[in-house]
Image (cartoon, helix red, strand yellow):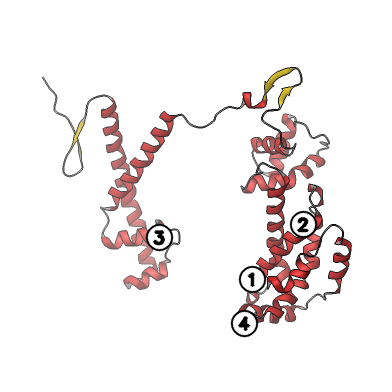
Amino acid sequence: MTAKIASWSFAANESSLPRYLRDIQQFPMLESQDEYMLAKRWSEDGDRDAAHKLVTSHLRLVAKIAMGYRGYGLPISEVISEGNVGLMHAIKRFEPERGFRLATYAMWWIKAAIQEYVLRSWSLVKMGTTTNQKKLFFNLRKAKSKISVLEDGDLRPEQVKLIARRLGVTEQDVVDMNSRLGGDVSLNAPIRDTNPGERQDWLVDETSNQEAQLADSEETNNRLQALHDALTVLTPRERRIFEARRLTDDPVTLAELASEYGVSRERVRQIETKALDKLQRRVRIRLTELQQVATERLAGEPLTMSSSGAVNPSPCRM
C-alpha cells in the first residue's frame, strides 16, 4: 500500500506545498457505503486499489489537521507527511464492521503521528512521553494566552497554579514544561553575565544514595520471597486460577477457566477471591518474619528458623 500511494503521501515539500494542497482536492470524498465496501475489500482481500482510494480520499483531512501544528517552527510539508503515515496506520487497523467512519477513527492516528514528530523534532532534549507531558506541550501556549501571559520567561506562582488546575496536571509539571519550551540551553552557559558559574554547577543529583538503593532492593526481594512462599499455601487449582488471573500480562477470562475446570464463572471468581485472601494473610505473616530476621541481624542477635519456616529466637547465653 505504501508504494502505491507514495507519490501522493510524501509529495509535499515547502516549494510544492500549494500545488500539493490543490491537487489533493481532486480526490472525491467517499459515501458511507462506498467507504465500507472499500475497507472490507482491503481488510479481507488485501485489495491495494481499495486501500489507495481510502488513503487519497482522506488526504485533505490530514492536511487540515496538520495545519493546526504550524506554530512549532517545523516544515508544514513534513508535518503533513507524518500525518499521512498515521493515516496509513489507521487504514491498516480499521474495522468497518464496528460501525463508525474511517475519518473518526483515523483522526487519533493522524494526530498521534504528528505529535510524535513534533516531540522528536522540536527540541534536542526529548520533551517527554507521559500523558501529562504531552498535554502540557501541546496546550501550554494556549493556556498562557488565555490568562494574558505573553512573555516566555518564568511564570508567577499564581499563574502556575491556575494553569495546573485548568489542565489537570501538577504545578511542577507546568514549571518544568514552561522552562523546556523556552528553548534548549547549554549546561555550560553562564547563569548571569556577572556570574562566572555555569548552569551545570547548580544541578543536583536526585538519585538515591547506595544505602537507600540497597534498602529498596532488599525490600523488593523480601516481597518477592514472601509472595513465592505464600503461593505454597494454595491448592493446585487455587494457584492455577490465581496465577492465570493475577500474575500474567494477558489474564485468562473467567469463562475460559470455568470451561477448563467444568464449573461456573461465579465459582471461578469465588476461588480467585479466596486464594487472594489466603495469599494476603500469608504474605503479611511472612513479611513480618523476614523483617524480624533483618532487624535481629542488624542488632547482632541472629535468629534461627525452624523447618516449618517459623522464626525462633536464639537461646540466651548465660
Look at the numbered discs 2 and 3 and tell me whether their residues touch, using CB distance below 8 Å: no
Q: Name the N-terminal-most of marks 4 and 2.
A: 4
Q: Position of residue 308 (x, y in %)?
A: 17, 44
Look at the numbered discs 3 and 4 and tell me whether their residues touch, using CB distance below 8 Å: no
- The image's mark for residue 92 is 1
User: What crowding class fits label 3: few (fewer than 14 Cα within 10 Å), some (14-19), or many (20 or more)?
Assistant: some
Q: Which numbered mark, 4 or 2, is in the foreground of this view?
A: 2
In three-dimensional space, the C-alpha distance between marks 2 and 3, rounded to whole angstroms, equals: 45 Å
Q: In which quadrant will I find the N terminus? A: bottom right
In three-dimensional space, the C-alpha distance between marks 3 and 1, rounded to whole angstroms, equals: 31 Å
Q: In which quadrant will I find the C terminus? A: top left
Secondary structure beneath dot 1 equals helix
- The image's mark for residue 45 is 4
In three-dimensional space, the C-alpha distance between marks 1 and 4, rounded to whole angstroms, equals: 12 Å
Under mark 1, the amino acid is: Lys
Q: Which numbered mark, 2 or 1, is in the foreground of this view?
A: 2
Q: Is residue 4 above or below residue 170?
A: below
Q: Name the N-terminal-most of marks 2 and 1.
A: 2
Q: Name the N-terminal-most of marks 1 and 4.
A: 4
